[in-house]
Image (tube, helix red, strand yellow):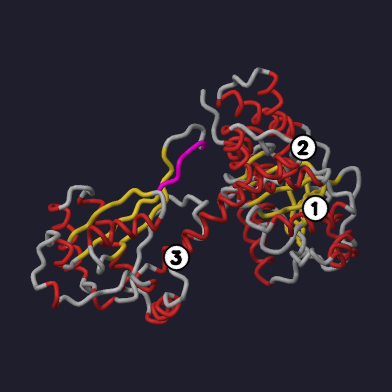
């Protein structure tokens, strides 16, 4: 077996090299997107690492020395789409996301590949001694990935084989994706030309692309980029890349300056937690309670109105038991008032509410009837950063009509994009007070921090 690694610009380049060097029966073991060069996580060149292997004697035989007469050699067509791994065809549609993890790949023609774990591992390690490009440890890792792929259940394997018969080849898909990206860049430049705007210098184009990857709205990104462009022109177009990025960073931090809110105030008696289903409201309440109990030594009480989910009450009851705090369950505005009276001895009352489809404003109005906002209460809207930006906007629009001005963003650890935070704060007069970045109570609760968001948006600042 021969195993080789290729670093290429596009997948079609890799396929051509694999066909030329390893033959028509070559198998792609893994693909991984790489980013090379640049600074601050930007201005990097994208490359694709492709690792391929072949057991065919044809691949190892010297060119020009066929083992049989040429006339009797059967002619084979080029690699067909079904010989290209299904995993790659799915990943090429998302080449703008750098996962950094190689994935196991299986081909449709499994009968051509060794099916035994020990045969594959031995063959790969033996190939490592023949071919120098990869270390034995790296190849053994690939062998492990491949054997894992062999153990996939028949149903999923059949699904992969059926989807592998799509008429559009991987090479065509890759070329189409590249052409679309080129057209988008061309249209952007054309739009600036038609509007009488000068073309952006390359560093600012890279920054603007980064902001787009972070899902910052074009309107907001244009404001920041135009500020940097104006400064660049006024400076005689001599600014360095670092200076241009510093201007964008300053604009982003200035934007957040008045949109970062404080946490729970000292004089607050009641905190209402509202938000759609599945965003982590109950866990967030437990984190807030633990913070108030352990850091500020407050006596805390729980109220829950989430009677739609059977597990919700038990979940909060578990947290209440661990934190040794009282819990009241309510179903109506009258129940809420009676529960408040029973918890009067507490310094702070945290009220959990039901998660509903708050894209429907009727549910928002129904929820608001349970709440009793006052000068000694605060209401926090909890939103997940893994939600669609458009849905977050609509939900915020509905809740903002009832005077809610504070937001908690959850699941920061499950996303690489913080643009939706900026977009929401740009559209609505809200302040972000907390973010959560995991399931651990109380550790994974952070006070909103300007540097935290800016570093995720533009990359950590070099010192």
At which x and y percent is residue 248?
65, 31
Foreground of the two, 319 or 126: 126
- Distance from the alpha carbon under mark 1 to that under mark 2: 20 Å
User: What's drawn in magenta, residue-wise?
Assistant: 42-47
At which x and y percent is residue 40?
51, 33
At which x and y percent is residue 365?
89, 63
* Neighbour tally class for label 3: few under 14, some 14-19, many 20 plus, Cα within 10 Å: some
- In the picture, measured across the screen, residue 224 lies left or right of residue 67, that is right
* Neighbour tally class for label 2: few under 14, some 14-19, many 20 plus, Cα within 10 Å: many
Image position of 204 with respect to 328: above or below:
above
Mark 3 or 1: in front is 3
At horizontal 77% and vertical 37% (from top left) the residue drawn is 259
At horizontal 60% and vertical 29% (from top left) the residue drawn is 245
Quadrant for the N terminus, please.
bottom left
Image position of 310 with respect to 393: above or below:
below
Q: Is residue 44 magenta?
A: yes
- Distance from the alpha carbon under mark 3 to that under mark 1: 47 Å
Tell me which corner region of the image, top left, top right, bottom left or bottom right, holds residue 3. bottom left
Foreground of the two, 439 or 83: 83
Query: Which residue is disc 3 drawn over?
Result: 89
At horizontal 58% and vertical 40% (from top left) the residue drawn is 456
Mark 2 or 3: in front is 3
Whether tag 2 and tag 3 are in contact, CB under 8 A, the answer is no
Query: Which residue is disc 2 drawn over?
Result: 259
Whether tag 3 and tag 1 are in contact, CB under 8 A, the answer is no
Query: Which residue is disc 1 drawn over?
Result: 272
């Amino acid at each position: 077996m021969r195993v080789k690694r290729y670093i290429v610009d596009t997948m079609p380049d890799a396929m051509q090299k694999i066909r030329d060097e390893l033959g028509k029966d070559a198998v792609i073991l893994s693909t991984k997107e790489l980013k090379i060069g640049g600074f601050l996580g930007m201005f990097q060149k994208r490359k694709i690492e492709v690792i391929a292997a072949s057991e065919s004697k044809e691949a190892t035989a010297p060119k020009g020395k066929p083992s049989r007469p040429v006339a009797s050699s059967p002619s084979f067509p080029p690699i067909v789409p079904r010989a290209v791994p299904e995993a790659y065809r799915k990943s090429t549609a998302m080449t703008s996301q750098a996962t950094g993890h190689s994935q196991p790949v299986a081909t449709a023609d499994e009968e051509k590949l060794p099916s035994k774990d020990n045969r594959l591992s031995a063959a790969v390690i033996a190939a490592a001694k023949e071919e120098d490009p990869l270390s034995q440890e790296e190849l053994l890792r690939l062998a492990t990935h491949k054997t894992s792929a062999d153990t996939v259940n028949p149903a999923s394997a059949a699904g992969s084989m059926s989807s592998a018969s799509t008429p559009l080849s991987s090479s065509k898909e890759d070329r189409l994706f590249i052409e679309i990206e080129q057209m988008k860049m061309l249209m952007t430049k054309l739009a600036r030309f038609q509007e009488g705007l000068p073309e952006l210098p390359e560093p600012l184009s890279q920054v603007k692309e980064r902001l787009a990857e972070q899902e910052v709205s074009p309107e907001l990104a244009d404001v920041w980029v135009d500020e940097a462009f104006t400064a660049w022109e006024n400076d005689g177009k001599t600014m360095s890349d670092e200076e241009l990025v510093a201007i964008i960073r300053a604009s982003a931090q200035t934007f957040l300056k008045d949109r970062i809110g404080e946490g729970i105030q000292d004089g607050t008696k009641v905190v209402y937690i509202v938000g759609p289903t599945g965003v982590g409201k109950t866990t967030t309440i437990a984190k807030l309670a633990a913070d108030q109990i352990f850091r500020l030594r407050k006596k805390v009480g729980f109220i829950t109105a989430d009677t739609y989910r059977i597990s919700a009450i038990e979940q909060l009851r578990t947290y209440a038991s661990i934190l040794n705090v009282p819990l009241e369950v309510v179903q109506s505005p009258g129940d809420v008032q009676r529960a408040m009276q029973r918890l009067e001895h507490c310094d702070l009352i945290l009220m959990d509410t039901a998660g509903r489809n708050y894209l429907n404003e009727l549910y928002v109005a129904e929820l608001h009837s349970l709440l009793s906002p006052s000068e000694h209460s605060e209401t926090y809207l909890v939103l997940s950063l893994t939600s669609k930006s458009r849905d977050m906007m609509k939900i915020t629009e509905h809740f903002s009509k009832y005077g809610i001005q504070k937001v908690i963003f959850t699941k920061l650890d499950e996303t690489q994009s913080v643009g939706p935070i900026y977009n929401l704060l740009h559209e609505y007069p809200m302040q972000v007070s907390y973010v959560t970045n995991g399931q651990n109570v109380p550790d994974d609760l952070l006070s909103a921090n300007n540097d935290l968001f800016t570093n995720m948006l533009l990359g950590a600042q070099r010192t």
